[in-house]
Amino acid sequence: MAKSENNNKFVNLKRTLQALQSKRINSTYKDLKENPEYAKIGAFFFEKLYSPEDFSFRDASIKKLQKILKGKIYKGIISAVSKVIELHELSDKLDNLMVQHMIKMKIGPEMDMDQYQRVYRSLNNYKQRIYQIKLSTDVTRTFHRLSKKWIVVLSLKTVHTAAHLLGISKIIDFVYEAYEGFRAIKNIDYFVKTVEERELAWHEKIWSSKSSAEK
């Protein structure tokens, strides 16, 4: 019973953490999300790449994907998916670490932003957070480049039926959604630079605003 209660506590705290992160992201990028030019890409970036959703397609390894689709799909797609999986695994790992520190610091579901920042700093992983930000923008640029290649949509259409039969449809659907979101945008630089600059600024703000109790 105690183990079950601990698991429930962990899950509930993780939901609290991710809800707070989602609220912050929606506030930070309200202007981008409301810009018609970025409507589709915004939905993909903020609701897929940065969402707390657990991507079940992570269970399908890249090796399995390569084996099933070898010669049937553009290899750049598999490379892009591998980066997405890396990003989600890293983000999930960092969220779990933050929850562990929340428990250690006796911070509960009522966590506010000041407490969030204290927990964020307590991980003492400055460079890893920078890497997380850079990886997310790298993924965005990668999908934008893919959206400009005619072979990508041809590959997706070719393997669509097979993907559903083989149980990897979520991966293909995810890539197609990204393709749809990015293909209408000619230049991705403003979007990517805005996200990168704001995330780095947010990271630096947290790191430089230690309370007197922490110093």
Image (cartoon, helix red, strand yellow):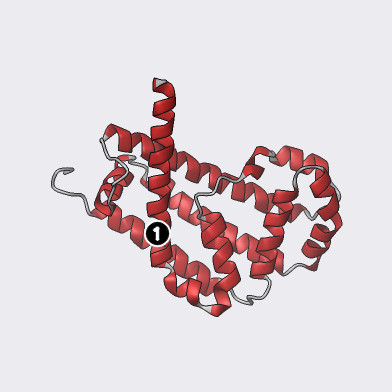
Name the quadrant of the C terminus. Answer: top left
Residue 2 position within the rendered picture, expressed as x and y whole percent measured from the top left? 39, 21
Q: Is residue 205 left or right of residue 186?
A: left
Question: Quarter of the image containing the N terminus?
Answer: top left
Q: Amino acid at mark 1?
A: Lys
Mark 1: which secondary structure? helix
Count of numbered circles on the image: 1
Q: Percent from the top left, x then y, of residue 183?
A: 68, 71
Can see residue 127? Answer: no
At which x and y percent is residue 198?
39, 65
Q: Position of residue 17 (x, y in %)?
A: 38, 47
Residue in the foreground of this view, choosing between 24 and 191: 24
Vertical arrangement, residue 138 with respect to residue 170, above or below: below
The crowding category of the residue bearing disc 1, from other C-alpha atoms within 10 Å (few below 14, some 14 to 19, many at least 20), is few
The reply to whether residue 31 is in sight is yes
Left/right placement of residue 192 relative to residue 2 reads: right
Q: Quadrant of residue 54?
A: top right
23 or 147, nearer to the observer: 23
Where is mark 1, residue-wise?
A: 23
Say whether residue 98 is left or right of residue 189: left
Residue in the foreground of this view, choosing between 103 and 41: 103
Q: Residue placed at 70% from the left, 63% from the top?
A: 146
